[in-house]
Amino acid sequence: MRSRRRMYSAVMRFFLKCLRLGQRRRFWLTRQVEQLWLYGRLCLRSLLYNSFADGDTALDALFEPIYWLVDHVTRWFGVVFVALVITLTSSVVVIVYVCLIPLILQTYPIAWVFWHIIYGHWNLVMIVFHYYMAITTQPGYPPQQSKSDVAAVSICRKCIAPKPARTHHCSICNRCVLKMDHHCPWLNNCVGHFNHRYFFSFMLFMTMGCIYSSVSGWDMFWEAYAAIETYSQTPPPTFSFRQRAFHKSVVYAWVLCSSVALALGALMLWHSVLITRGETSIERHINRKERKRLQWKGKVFRNPYSYGPLGNWKVFLGVERHRHWVTRVLLPSTHPPYGSGLSWDTAPCVAEQKTPLLAI
């Protein structure tokens, strides 16, 4: 009897020992699995970790396929956009020469005739000149190899080359651009250091020309529109084919000029604000984030490339003497911008730099 009890107790002890061993082994396996899971998650997070990541970075990642599509569409349709600008502008010029100038010569006083002829042709020359220079002038590219005069601030991760200050990579041109503002599909070219002035001058004079055409053709537009409204009357009016073409051409030109004046005028005003602040379109977003970051730290952001409103305009337009406001702004001029775009020193046309070079 005692031997049975001893045997039974020995079996129970062995069974409990095996049970404890199994529990320990399961616990050990569970612990190993948890450690492997934590280690794998840590590795994955270390690969994707970025201290500069925020909501904008996530949105950029989500919209990356759309950006890729827009880049390729813009690259291939740039020539179409340029042809569209030339075609629309030429159509308005042809309507003015064929329809409006003969009417002006017959009905307007001699003083108004001289005003329209002189101002209209000056505005047309400025538009054609600056648009041609904007699409044919390269915006400026940094050298592929480092040079002693290149103050590189970083390395472009796409070009794998030194990137000077104010230089950004254009995904459409697939290369870095000096003082890049944006890639303009209507120019089929980037707007950068060497053609930024041509781009803005084109917008300015195109807006001025469209406003001039809309204001001076207001009465003609309403007369032509009223005539077109009578086409559906019974009996129809006895307008010849030439008269109908004249009415429709005047309405078309006025609507086109007014639409361009509103759209392009708004864009021109926006770039005027950027130039006054000494910024480009890209730097506007960068400086805004930097201003918020320094404000959170109790500091004040200073734009290192701003010389004050008047100084910024002088540097941008290349005005070094008083006569340059006429010879370089109001007349066609091919003078290059100040500096090479590789380094940014104080321009000679600015007496003293208005802001320090670093944020305080």
Image (cartoon, rainbow, N blue to C red):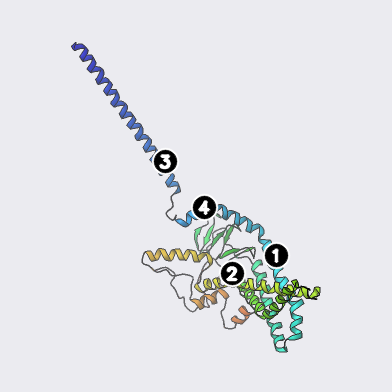
Q: Is residue 348 above or below residue 343?
A: below
Residue 51 quadrant: bottom left
Name the side, left or right, on which 75 lies relative to 169.
Answer: right
Observer-nearest of 154 and 85: 85
Dot 4 corresponds to which residue?
A: 62
SS for callout 4: helix
- Looking at the rendered structure, the kind of residue marked 2 is His
In the image, residue 74 lies at what x, y percent?
63, 59
Choose the circle earlier in sequence order: 4 or 3.
Answer: 3
Observer-nearest of 217 and 348: 217
Dot 1 corresponds to which residue?
A: 83
SS for callout 2: helix
Dot 2 corresponds to which residue?
A: 196
Choose the circle earlier in sequence order: 1 or 3.
Answer: 3
Q: Quadrant of the N terminus?
A: top left
Q: Are marks 2 and 1 in contact (CB under 8 Å)?
A: no
Dot 3 corresponds to which residue?
A: 40
Observer-nearest of 273 and 129: 273
| Alpha-carbon span between mark 4 and mark 3 | 25 Å
- Looking at the rendered structure, the kind of residue marked 1 is Ala
Query: How many neighbours does mark 1 have within 10 angstroms: few (below 14), some (14-19), or many (20 or more)?
Result: some
Between marks 4 and 3 in the image, the one whose residue lies nearer the viewer:
4
| Alpha-carbon span between mark 2 and mark 1 | 21 Å
- Looking at the rendered structure, the kind of residue marked 3 is Gly
